Amino acid sequence: MSSPTVRFSVIGITHDHIYGQVRLMLRAGAEFVNWYAPESDPISQFSAVFSHVPMARCEEEILEDPSIHLVLTSAVPADRAPLGIRVMQHGKDFMSDKPGFTTLEQLAEARRVQAETGRIYSICFSERLEVPAAVKAGELVHAGAIGKVIQTVGLGPHRARLHTRAPYFFERERYGGILCDIGSHQMDQFLFYTGSTEAEIVSAQVGNFKYPQYPGLEDFGDVVLRGNGGMGYVRVDWYTPDGLPTWGDGRLFILGTEGYIELRKYVDIEGRPGGDHLFLVDQKGVHYIDCKGGDLPYGRQLVYDIINRTETALPQWHTFYASELAIRAEMQAVRLGNLR
């Protein structure tokens, strides 16, 4: 007897993260049924990459198909939550690119509908879930390798590549602000590695210091957090110089009572090739772990959760709470520089 198969579709492909979302589900053995995108989305490239998968005639064709279990999206950030709510109301599970929400009102409605329907509203926090070094760090932390975690420091620099960006990139109400957008990755990691279930925003600030011609673009942000499991600091920006051989030197520092871990996720400027570098310093010495090719369980865990109605990939409270912290940080942030 063959194992149950999860069938999934895509609605909205505005951000390139959708390619990673689709591929992680394919790796997990799920079946890609069809996809639909508004006219403003980059349809030709997507159809070329997944040429064997048909395009649906409209959103309703997907939502009203009872054989489809899961819908993926990387639509404009402000449009993701309304879509996710429609998906859940049609009895399907949902995976959004980050951010999954841009306002507290969207989040409140999604929480209500999720509780009412019992469906899954997942967010692909790829900087943890799709980075082997980050997965390995979680294993080490939960095994007690560095003692009790006291603080995380998450750095999320990105290359702007403004000439490639869709119009929403320059409109804060559509992308949610830099702390809501990129910062949601860091909130996810803070909660996961510290084990915090509650947290407060101690301070936050955002600014536009490089691009005065785009007053709706926030190019810098940082946050200080205090949780019931540890403390956190977050810094995100759009300043990655063209000289770096990848889009951003993403790093994570996890401080424990018995040691610390540093992740150089995408590049090691000291000279080691590629990404997924993990450094562990403990009472016995300094250890380097090359995590390339390491396990990435999120996709298969999500498949398991869809079939068995469990929460092994991402606890639902965690998904919502990481998003809430990112939105609240954005709302509380002091606004600096050229921001309108």
Image (cartoon, grey):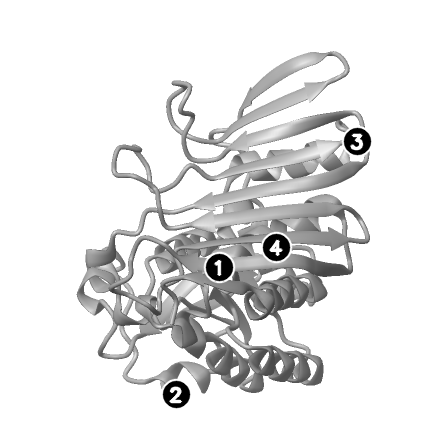
The CA distance from mark 4 to mark 2 is: 33 Å
The residue at the point 56 percent across, 81 percent down is 106
Residue at label 1? 206
The CA distance from mark 2 to mark 3 is: 48 Å
The residue at the point 49 percent across, 66 percent down is 96
Res. 192 in view = yes
Q: Amino acid at mark 1?
A: Val
107 displayed left or right of 141? left
Tag of residue 112: none
Above/below status of 217 relative to 284: below
Q: Amino acid at mark 4?
A: Met
Q: Earlier in the sequence, mark 4 or mark 3?
A: 3
38 displayed left or right of 163? right
User: What percent of the width, then of the height, locates residue 193?
Assistant: 70, 44
Q: Could you tell me which quadrant the C terminus lies in?
A: bottom left
The residue at the point 46 percent across, 80 percent down is 83
Q: Earlier in the sequence, mark 1 or mark 2?
A: 2
Q: Amino acid at mark 3?
A: Gly
Residue at label 2? 60
Residue at label 4? 187
Circle 4 packing at 10 Å, graded few (<14), some (14-19), many (20+), is many
Tag of residue 144: 3
> Quick one: SS at disc 1?
strand
Q: Earlier in the sequence, mark 1 or mark 4?
A: 4
